[in-house]
Image: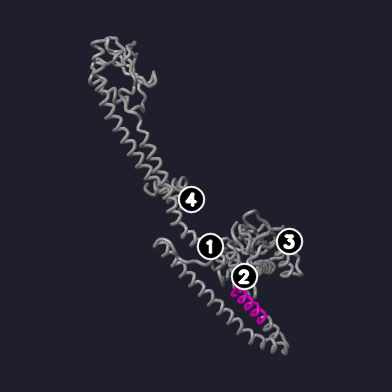
Amino acid sequence: MYETSDAYLHGLSRRWLPRSFYARAALILIVPIVTIQLAVAVMFLQRHYEDVTVQMTGNMAREIALVLEEPALAPALDIELTAPPARDRIRAWDLSARAMREALVEILPNLTAVDTSTTRRTVWLGFANGTGMQFDRRNVSAANPHQLPVLMVAVALVMTAVSFLFMRGQIRPIRRLARAAEAFGRGELADYRPTGAAEVRAAGTAFLAMRARIERHIEQRTLLLSGVSHDLRTPLTRMKLELSMMEGEEAEALSQDVAAMERIIDTFLDFARDSATDTLLVVDLGELVRETVAMSAPDRDVALETVEMRAPLYPEGMRRAVANLVKNALSYGEQVRVRVHGGETAAVVTVEDDGPGIPETQREAATRPFARLDGARSNTVGNVGLGLSIVADVARAHGGTLRLGRSELGGLKAEIVVPRGWFPKGDGRPGRT
């Protein structure tokens, strides 16, 4: 029961609360202040109207009593004798009229009706002997203290403006931290220095330490894979030379093993290749994919469907990712289809084949480095499980993602989705519009 109520309240908060932290913080500051001011104002005005109204009504009741005894005194006391009202008529929100009626009933027991709504700004009374009276409402009610509401509104506006300025200064360091984290996710090293409140500075310091650890890890991984791959090329070259002078089936089998090892080494180098020298440029993704397919599969029939789709890209990284997908598709299938499409916010490169595909339960694992699947897509010579991992890294460097699914051709459908919300600034560097 408690879990259901908590979920319901959480749903309401998500539906009605603003999304930004800036707006929520401002709401937390403003709502209590406005609520307290309204409560104090209502209580003060109600008490003011009731006390003053009761006091003025007591004075007026004595004059009414005199007129009931001596009707000739009515004009001198600004009281008009009329027919009595049929019944009580007091508006529900007229608090001073209710206080006035209670005071008149207590002082004048023969009062039968009080009407404050039929005639504007006039009080109409009726008595048991059939006498009716009318007099100015201002004789029993205090004037509206408009200075208090005006002062409250002015102070509320000033404090709201101060609160917004204060919150803007507090939110700015959080936004800078978010931009730095977003840039690091795209592979960029944005200049960031922790500022703001102690908690925000602590989060910024933790982010910088995390970024430094990740950079050291990437650098160590790159050096390790590059060094190992480079050192293996020398003995592999000697083996190729020796095998070229040998004849027989065993020599041919060993040559195939050496070729597989070379493909593995090339894959390691691709995975370890640093993209720091790759510059983010606004290019035509359709043209880039056409060139990549032509270079990756010069002698194969690949169905290609492209449109002009300009987007900010790391050209070399995107070529490497598309080439990996095309080569994988050609390795596992006979029919391959490549398509470039998208909209105003995102560009998509889709590569499909009619091969065995990847089961849905293994698609997430397939994008991890060195993942080896048990299905048919992992049994080729020289496969070390880095192809899709390289593509996923390239997609993340662009602020996008790699999606795997089932193709209409029967095999795997791989989609590289990258955002199009970045365009060059005046200085030639990419930036948000």
In the rendered structure, find residue 418 and report the number of the disc placed on it: none
Report the residue at 73% width, 61% height from top: 304
Identify residue for label 2.
387
Query: In the figure, residue 416 lies in which quadrant?
Result: bottom right
Q: Which SS class for mark 1?
A: helix
Q: Amino acid at mark 3?
A: Leu
Q: Which residue is mark 1?
A: 182
Mark closest to the chain's N terminus, 2 or 4: 4
Label 2: how many Cα within 10 Å (few below 14, some 14–19, many 20+): many
Q: Position of residue 43 (x, y in %)?
A: 31, 36
**Comparing labels 2 and 4, the label whose residue is closer to the camera:** 4
Mark nearest the camera among 1 and 3 is 1
Q: Which SS does the magenta portion mostly show?
A: helix
> Where is mark 3, residue-wise?
304
Report if the CB atoms under discs 2 and 3 are less than 8 Å apart: no
Query: CB atoms at circles 4 and 3 under 8 Å apart?
Result: no
CA distance separating discs 2 and 1: 25 Å
Q: Are marks 2 and 1 in contact (CB under 8 Å)?
A: no
In the image, taking residue 401 as reference, residue 136 lies left or right, namely left
CB contact under 8 Å: marks 2 and 4: no
Upstream in sequence: badge 2 or badge 3: 3
- Nearest the eye: 197 or 378: 197
User: Could you say where residue 30 lies in the image, as x and y percent from the top left?
Assistant: 40, 46
Query: Helix, strand or loop at disc 4?
Result: loop
